[in-house]
Image (cartoon, rainbow, N blue to C red):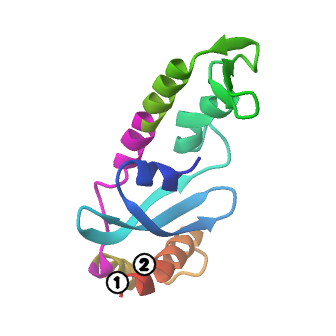
Amino acid sequence: MSYQQALSAAGAVVIGTKYAGSYQGTWGSIVEYQGKKGLVTGSFGSCSQCDAFESEFDDYDWSPNVITHDTETDTYSRDYGNTQCTKQEYDVQKAEYQQKLSNFGMRYLHVIQDKWDIENQLAHLSKDEDNWYDDETRELLAWALPLLS
């Protein structure tokens, strides 16, 4: 799962994505959403305490409450296979997850930066080579600009 899947679940078409930084930094995706094409951004981290997506969805990867489908036996279970479930329970949980994913993605679609926004930011970023944050932002914006031309 990822930020981009959340954007898609919210109804955006994700054209491209870039992560600027190493174990933490800024991500950006070029999206088309409700007739507007532009850049949406957010921060990422390396753990569930410092990354919004991991914090919100980490339980869906590791929780014993998540219902899984074994395609070989066509059975549904939770608690790592120890508790049998129904397809209906699986479908309900999947729908709830998709809604949560969509709601999460919507948080990022309120501000879609167009070409002018990106050019304006690039023109006003610090030219100080020791400013790592501006370098990270500059890298992301420089990547996005040609995709919006």
Closer-to-camera residue (26/12)? 12
Question: Residue 69 colored magenta?
Answer: no
On the image, numbered disc 2 is attached to which residue?
125
- In the visual, does 41 lie left or right of 81? left
The residue at which mark 1 appears reads as: 119
- Marks 2 and 1, the one that precedes in the sequence: 1
Highlighted magenta segment, given as a residue range: 99-116
Amino acid type, callout 1: Glu
Q: Quadrant of the C terminus?
A: bottom left
Left or right of 106 in this view: 72: right
Residue placed at 27% from the left, 81% from the top?
A: 116
Q: CA distance from mark 2 to mark 1?
A: 10 Å
**Is residue 88 shown above or below 12?**
above
**Which element type, helix, strand or loop, lies under badge 1?**
helix
As helix, strand or loop, the secondary structure at mark 2 comes to loop
Q: Residue furthest front?
A: 73
Which residue is outermost to the left?
Answer: 35
The answer to which of 86 and 3 lies nearer the viewer is 86
Question: Could you tell whether 90 is left or right of 24 in the image?
Answer: left
Q: Name the residue rendered at 39%, 43% in the picture.
A: 102
Up-down: is 98 above or below 37?
above
Position of residue 79 relative to residue 137, above or below, is above
Q: Can residue 100 be seen?
A: yes
Q: Position of residue 50 (x, y in %)?
A: 59, 42
Residue at position x 59%, y 81% in the image? 129
Horizontal relation, residue 13 to residue 50: left or right: left
Position in image of residue 54 (x %, y %): 59, 40
One can see residue 107 in this view: no
- Badge 1: residue crowd in 10 Å (few <14, some 14–19, many ≥20): few
